[in-house]
Image (tube, coloured by chain):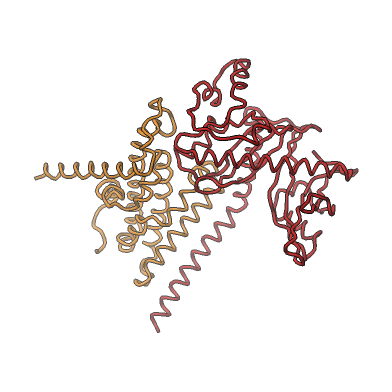
Chain colours: A red, B orange
């Protein structure tokens, strides 16, 4: 009995101390970590638009986010509605509106949200605002988000953060599309593919192959097991050549499929399929959203 | 085993050469085979392991008198897991650049055999200062081993070192694959053993 007590006390004290240390460090580092994640996200977005340390973004470049949710009704579990949280403009300025759509894509309800645009990137703030308008019976489940980059009143690009299955684990990526849905850029944000094989998906010579693919081609993009032509590789890696020559060379590869990475066909296919899926579902949803907004007379903030 | 009589510098070198975790003790072979495709991997993982080893060894050396001998292992595991979590959180918060590269490795360290083994055979019998030097030596020895394997595999497999092109052409893909890890580890162990054998012969 004595031993049981001694062992139990010993382990409880160990756990307690370990908990104190970890809890303390968590409290100290939590804010900094969140800030970093947000910063990395923003840097990725700017990088895809071609801005960085040496080329600062213009002052009037703004990011407007659309958040997609699934709404579950406690009374009718089978029925799930789609909801978009979109920034709209009215006389007083910008505010968020929640558009609830049926599964057929018809607008059911448009609700005003009490959510300041600056705080919308915080998942907690959004959830609170949603709970306030939806009531207790309905539950909102976060789907994904899309960001529209605007400069003045002109759309510059759509930025789509997303995740899709890779060879081993989920790959987190961001896809940038031109206003006409041509691919503007691809960035792999997190992955756990094999270093040296599937890990090469982060390299310029792979991800830049997607750049400039028109939407029509993107929808039926495939992966081919052919060696990457040397002159194409040089362009993809950003070799210094005259712009005219570059454009001529690139147009030659514009309608080509994606060249698979050596020894990592599965990873190459996973990325291609994932980006394809992200782009096509976004294009479909976005067009629908725009249609609804125009029939409802809403002025979208992008 | 009673407390060690070796001096601090001997303890430090012991971890790197005589009792190198990978080549002599043959511990922590999973990372030695799986994560050594590049030298950068070896370096980053080595740094993380060194920190965890030093912190854990020092903690155990401090509290060794209060640990009930029958529950040593759970206590070690708690200690290691705590330090790994702390390092993981600190890296994520203050060095996001490095965290992006080594984040996936740091969490794996909890299960590394070498750390528990050093706590069990050394830190729980020796004082704080000696445990610090032993931990540092073992951590750096691990780093040395990982980087040595990484050097061979990266150079022969991808023709690069630390990601910089050295050979200028893509070489034997085989060396990047996991199986080559076993070959490299085996060959290097053989070299270590051969050198030791020769040294012993000389002494005689």
Residue B39 lies in what quarter of the image?
Answer: top left
- Which corner quadrant holds the C terminus of chain A? top right
Q: Is residue A48 left or right of residue A230?
A: right
Asked if residue A111 shows in the view, the reply is no
Residue B56, x across and y down, in percent: 40, 58
The residue furthest right is A91
Q: Position of residue A300 (x, y in %)?
A: 83, 41
Residue B52 vs residue A35: left or right? Answer: left
* Residue B157 coordinates in the image, percent (x, y): 37, 34
Query: Is A266 drawn above or below residue B113 in the view shown?
Result: above
Direction bottom: furthest residue: A1
Q: Nearer the viewer, residue B93 or A113?
A: A113
Query: Between residues B125 and A89, which one lies in front from this camera angle?
Result: A89
Q: Considering only vertical position in the picture, is B63 above or below A184?
A: below
Quick one: which residue is furthest to the left in this view? B204
Q: Quadrant of the N terminus of chain A?
A: bottom left
Q: Residue at x 69, y 31 (%)?
A: A57
């Amino acid at each position: 009995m004595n031993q049981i007590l001694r062992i139990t006390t010993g382990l409880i004290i160990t756990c307690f101390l370990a908990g104190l240390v970890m809890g303390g460090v968590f409290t100290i580092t939590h804010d900094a970590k969140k800030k970093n994640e947000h910063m990395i996200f923003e840097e990725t977005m700017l990088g895809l638009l071609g801005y960085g340390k040496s080329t600062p973004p213009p002052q009037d470049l703004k990011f407007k986010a659309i958040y997609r949710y699934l709404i579950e009704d406690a009374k009718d579990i089978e029925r799930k509605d789609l909801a978009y949280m979109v920034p709209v403009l009215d006389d007083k300025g910008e505010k968020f509106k929640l558009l609830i759509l049926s599964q057929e894509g018809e607008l059911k309800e448009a609700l005003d949200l009490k959510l300041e645009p600056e705080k919308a990137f915080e998942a907690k703030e959004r959830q609170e605002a949603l709970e306030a308008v939806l009531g207790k019976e309905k539950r909102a489940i976060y789907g994904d988000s899309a960001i529209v980059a605007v400069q003045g009143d002109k759309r510059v690009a759509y930025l789509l953060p997303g995740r899709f299955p890779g060879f081993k684990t989920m790959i987190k990526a961001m896809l940038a599309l031109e206003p006409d849905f041509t691919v503007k850029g691809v960035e792999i944000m997190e992955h756990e593919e094999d270093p040296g094989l599937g890990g090469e998906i982060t390299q310029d010579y792979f991800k830049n192959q997607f750049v400039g693919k028109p939407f029509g081609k993107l929808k039926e993009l495939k992966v081919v097991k052919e060696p990457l032509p040397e002159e194409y590789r040089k362009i993809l890696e950003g070799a210094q050549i005259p712009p005219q020559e570059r454009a001529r060379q690139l147009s030659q590869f514009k309608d080509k499929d994606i060249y698979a990475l050596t020894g990592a066909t599965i990873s190459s296919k996973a990325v291609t399929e994932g980006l394809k899926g992200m782009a096509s579902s976004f294009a479909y949803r976005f067009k629908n959203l725009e249609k609804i907004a125009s029939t409802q007379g809403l002025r979208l903030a992008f | 085993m009673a407390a060690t009589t070796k001096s601090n510098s001997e303890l430090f070198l012991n971890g790197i050469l005589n009792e190198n975790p990978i080549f002599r003790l043959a511990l922590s072979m999973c990372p030695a085979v799986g994560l050594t495709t590049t030298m950068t991997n070896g370096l980053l993982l080595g740094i993380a392991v060194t920190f965890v080893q030093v912190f854990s060894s020092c903690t155990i050396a401090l509290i060794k008198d209060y640990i009930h001998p029958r529950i040593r292992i759970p206590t070690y595991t708690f200690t290691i897991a705590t330090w790994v979590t702390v390092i993981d959180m600190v890296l994520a918060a203050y060095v996001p650049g490095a965290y992006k590269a080594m984040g996936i490795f740091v969490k794996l360290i909890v299960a590394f055999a070498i750390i528990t083994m050093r706590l069990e055979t050394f830190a729980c019998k020796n004082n704080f200062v000696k445990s610090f030097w032993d931990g540092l030596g073992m951590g750096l020895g691990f780093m040395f081993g990982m980087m040595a394997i990484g050097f061979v595999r990266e150079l022969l497999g991808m023709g690069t070192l630390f990601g910089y092109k050295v050979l200028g052409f893509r070489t034997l893909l085989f060396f990047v694959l996991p199986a080559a890890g076993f070959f490299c580890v085996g060959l290097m162990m053989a070299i270590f053993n051969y050198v030791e054998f020769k040294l012993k012969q000389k002494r005689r």
